[in-house]
Amino acid sequence: HAKRSGRRQVQVFTPALDDQRRDRFAVEAALRRALTGHEFTLHYQPQLRGARLESVEALLRWTSPTLGPVTPGRFIPVAEQCGLILPLGRWVRERACEQAAAWHHQGRPLRVAVNVSPLEFAQPDFVPHVHHLLERLDLPAHLLELEVTEGVLVQDLTGTATKLRALRALGVRISVDDFGVQHASLSALMALPADVLKLDRSFLSGHDGLGGVHAAGPQVLRAVHTLGRELNLDVLAEGVETPEQHALLRDLGFEYMQGFLFAPAMPADELDAWRAVRGSVSEPAQPTLLLE
Ligand code: C2E
Ligand code: MG
Ligand code: MG
Ligand code: MG
């Protein structure tokens, strides 16, 4: 639509578009090389239930020798567009499950949540691959959670539901990530066989105690929480950064939280240290509220 919007705007926006294309091109070229090298690592961010460590989310980290550190927000969309997300996603899944299996076999099991792109999820061999991975690593399925976004719905609702049901039949947990920011209809979302609803962190802006401007009031947070509970879903708030947000969410009944207030994503060995300190200090101090 840029070319229809007049000469002045074309002049204003064309350089920015060129920059974007150049960046995509550079990122794509570097990504192709990165897959054959050892430039990726997985970090793990704690997800809490009350004061307890419930699970971790695996988050991809990439430092390119040519581009330096590149954020997922910059390279995941490129990888999705050029199909590199398939080998990359497979790598993530395998490393995350290996880590979960290592923790399990060391006697300190911890569920790992793995992000899955719509394109990965659409592959016919996705469910069999997950199944074989669990078997090969001797990993109990309940220690794996797969995070899908509303994007998987847009393509093929029936196929998506069938696959999610197959995964849940294996014992894998399913969460709907970034809930509320994409365009899936509520009825489609409600038809999804899932276990967890992850409220996108944009819902929290304005509740930071700093006088934010976002329109979503506490009523919206409460409504989403109620909806999730009605659908028998665990509801997790992501992006909790301040004690004010934490207090508000707690008062609204949110049990599950994730955010910089508690911990950022970190390498597995740092997480081990974090668990060692935290496990002995804060767990008995603040008993978890059990709703069941
Ligand atoms: P996401 O799945 O919603 O992951 C949560 C993102 O929020 C992570 O960003 C995390 O570092 C960030 N975050 C957590 N707590 C806070 C907080 O308190 N404040 C703020 N401002 N941010 C917080 P990250 O690691 O940059 O990843 C961004 C997105 O990239 C992810 O969003 C996910 O959609 C995608 N992504 C990351 N790793 C993977 C992966 O292995 N596979 C796929 N397909 N996507 C990935
Ligand atoms: Mg996620
Ligand atoms: Mg998320
Ligand atoms: Mg998000």
Image (tube, rainbow, N blue to C red):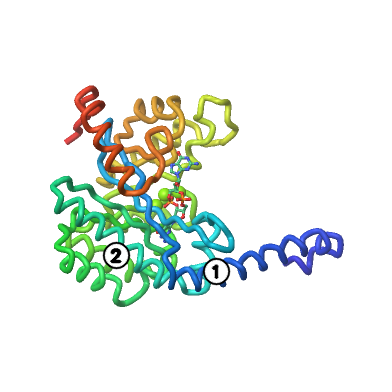
In the rendered image, the vertical position of residue 210 relative to residue 125, given as above or below:
above
Give the percent coordinates (x, y) of residue 270.
33, 43
Whether residue 128 is visible here, answered yes or no, is yes
Q: Nearer the viewer, residue 83 or 65?
A: 65
- Location of residue 156 (image quadrant): bottom left
Neighbour tally class for label 1: few under 14, some 14-19, many 20 plus, Cα within 10 Å? some
Q: Which residue type carries mark 2?
A: Glu
- Label 2 C-beta lies within 8 Å of the nearest ligand 1 atom: no
Residue depicted at 33% across the width and 54% down the height: 190
Give the percent coordinates (x, y) of residue 65.
54, 62
In the rendered image, the vertical position of residue 180 relative to residue 254, given as above or below:
below
Check disc 2 and report the residue beneath it. Answer: 94
Q: Secondary structure at mark 1?
A: helix
Q: Which residue type carries mark 1?
A: Ala
- Location of residue 281 (image quadrant): top left
Mark 1 to mark 2 CA distance (whole Å): 22 Å
Whether residue 153 is visible here, answered yes or no, is no
Give the percent coordinates (x, y) of residue 161.
30, 65
Q: Secondary structure at mark 2?
A: helix
Horizontal side of 120 relative to 9 (left or right) equals left
Q: Quadrant of the C terminus?
A: top left
Q: Nearer the viewer, residue 191 or 163?
A: 163
Residue mark closest to the camera, 1 vs 2: 1
Check disc 1 and report the residue beneath it. Answer: 30
Residue depicted at 50% across the width and 42% down the height: 202
| Identity of the residue furthest to the right in this view | 8
- Location of residue 199 (image quadrant): top left
Residue depicted at 23% across the width and 73% down the height: 128
Residue depicted at 37% across the width and 34% down the height: 262
Which comes before the other along the chain, label 1 or label 2? 1
Q: Quadrant of the N terminus?
A: bottom right
